[in-house]
Amino acid sequence: MTDTIYAPATAAGRAAVAVIRVSGPASGEAVRALIGGLPKPRQATLRTLRHDGVAIDDALVLWFQGPASYTGEDAAEFHVHGGRAVVEALLSALSALGLRLAEPGEFTRRAFQHGKLDLAQAEAVGDLIDAETEGQRRQALGQLGGALGRRYDGWRDLLVQALAMLEAAVDFPDEELPEDVAARARPGLETLAVEIDAALADVARGRRVRDGFRIALVGAPNAGKSTLLNALAERDAAIVTATPGTTRDVIEVPLVLGGYKALLADTAGIRETADDIEAEGVRRARAWADEADLRLWVVDAAAFHVKQSEHHAIVRAGDWLVVNKIDLVEPDAVEAIRVQTETLGLHVVSLSAREQGAGPIRAALTEHVVEALSGAEFPAATRIRHAERLGEARAYLQRALAEVDDVELAAEDVRLASRALSRITGRIDPEDVLDRVFSSFCIGK
């Protein structure tokens, strides 16, 4: 990495202050060229930036001598006024000095390659930048603080201990070792297998915090799904009419419930139809509902009758039954619906979205989302990549436990399990995942 890179670290557009970062071996030379010398390390200094004898701006300049910098290299920051002309002039000057505009995520990639961050921490930088809710912020900050790395390091320590016992039995068969030295590896491997099983069972939680808890409103046409969506969104996100089949496509609305991101979707009413457009909407509704973390089956209390049973085949335990428009029926009718559907394992909520609003159901949804996404322990996986490597490590562990009497094979599988865990933090063989990890970063980070 002989190139010296530069990039804006703040968003484009008019602002009070813009920050331009520089990192690489020629950083000091660039600072000298612009202000005539190097300021004291890690101390903000007010200087006039000049290039070819022309003043660019009065700026705060910070100099970081490697390895005591974000990237581990010599680095600098220029805090200038945020006008577009000022920023463009400074970027042009840095380019004229022979520096290169950074690729997306290149600053953080260099931090990883210089050992300032592990790969999971580097991913957390991007997550922290993208965080929209308190739950996302807490998860990203915990990961940036090394919570994932510490957990994987603990697991790798268990694998190293087991591997030491297995390899001792392989490499020193003639030494005076306990006869059961290889068998002593089994308890540690079994303990780790249980912990990884629990982590894999919890994989969805980390993904839901990061990407959002998906809630689908499904049901027959004119059940009140769009009205309920608008009430929960507190705006007119969907068109509401008395005409069945008004909603033809999936309408997604982001919500924040209890500090966590949720994605609420209004879907086309599920029914048999000869209309090609509406049929495509029904297909998309079913597809979105299949992938949802929670499905709210909205039914019209006044129109609920035996034909609703046609949806029973796709209802699953844990779904919610939202009995809507209860202002149009007697209380006994709501109870009859509850009795008719109690065998399906549904959580029943009754309301009138038009008359009462969404206050009670919003509170119930908030409680449900917080319960689903909060946990005593930090999630062991926040990305699909983590889950894939955990599954790989678990498969090797399972094979090692089955082969523990064949010490050489068991040792190799334990070694492969350790390697799979190491790839999550990038301690070994990281190149195959680096491009995918950093390509989604914004320029200048």
Image: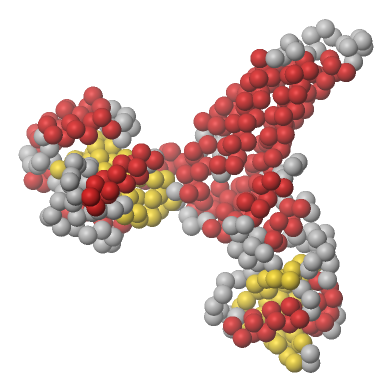
Classify residue 303 as left or right of residue 211.
left
Front residue of 48 and 390: 390
Q: In the image, residue 384 lies at what x, y percent?
A: 55, 42
Query: Left or right: 221 with respect to 281?
Result: left
For the point 55% across and 28% down, which residue is it? 198
- Percent across and percent down for residue 307 are 13, 34
Residue 219 visible in the shown view: yes
Residue at the top extreme of this rendering:
179
| Among the 4 quarters of the image, the one containing residue 110 | bottom right
Q: Nearer the viewer, residue 60 or 161?
A: 161
The answer to which of 186 and 426 lies nearer the viewer is: 426
State the residue lying farthest toward the right: 175
Quarter of the image that includes the N terminus: bottom right
- In percent of the image, x 59 and y 83: which residue is there? 84
Residue 402 vertical placement versus 332 (above, below): above
Figure check: 400 above or below 310: above
Q: Nearer the viewer, residue 228 or 405?
A: 405
Q: Quadrant of the C terminus?
A: bottom right
Q: Position of residue 82 (x, y in %)?
A: 60, 80
